[in-house]
Image (tube, rainbow, N blue to C red):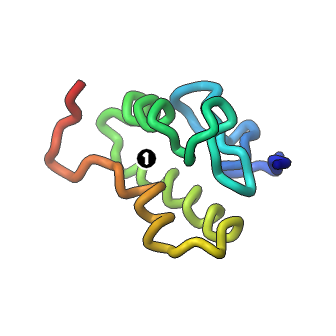
Amino acid sequence: MTSQTDAGPGSGGADAGPGAAGHLPERPGWTCAECGTAWPCPAKRSGLLDEYVGTGAALGIYLGACLVRAMGDLDQLPVAELRHQFLGWLPRAGTRRTG
């Protein structure tokens, strides 16, 4: 699978986002280049939560932009499945991260 290298969220380039360096998305399949699982993988999720402590809205915006790009690449998958993959794991407002 060949990854795209254009700039922007989820591109794997300079704008691939913070958190869990090395756990970047491989497009067009949106799998983790490091561990091969669906991106954002557990390591990337943890890294993003650490990076965006106190700025959950910014994390949601970043992942929303990644979701939009993934919808173009993975148009055969249900939108609800992609939404869950990219946003469904985020903590809800008023909850605290444990561990």
Q: Is residue 70 above or below residue 53?
A: below
What residue lies at 77% left-to-right and 49% top-to-bottom? 7
Which amino acid, by three-letter code, is at mark 1? Leu
22 or 50, which lies in front? 22
The residue positioned farthest toward the left in the image shown: 94
What residue lies at 51% left-to-right and 51% top-to-bottom? 62
43 or 35, which lies in front? 35
Q: Is residue 87 above or below residue 48?
A: below
Residue 24 shown left or right of residue 19 in the figure: right
Residue 19 shown left or right of residue 75 in the figure: left
Query: Which quarter of the rendered picture does the C terminus lie within?
Result: top left
1 or 43, which lies in front? 1
Q: Residues within 10 Å of mark 1 (few under 14, many from 20)?
A: many
Which quadrant of the view contains residue 32?
top right
19 or 70, which lies in front? 70
Residue 45 % position (x, y) = 44, 38
Residue 23 % position (x, y) = 61, 32
Residue 63 % position (x, y) = 50, 53
Q: Is residue 17 above or below residue 7?
A: above
Total marks shown come to 1
As helix, strand or loop, the secondary structure at mark 1 comes to helix
Mark 1, residue position: 59
What residue lies at 72% left-to-right and 41% top-to-bottom? 12
What residue lies at 43% left-to-right and 72% top-to-bottom? 80
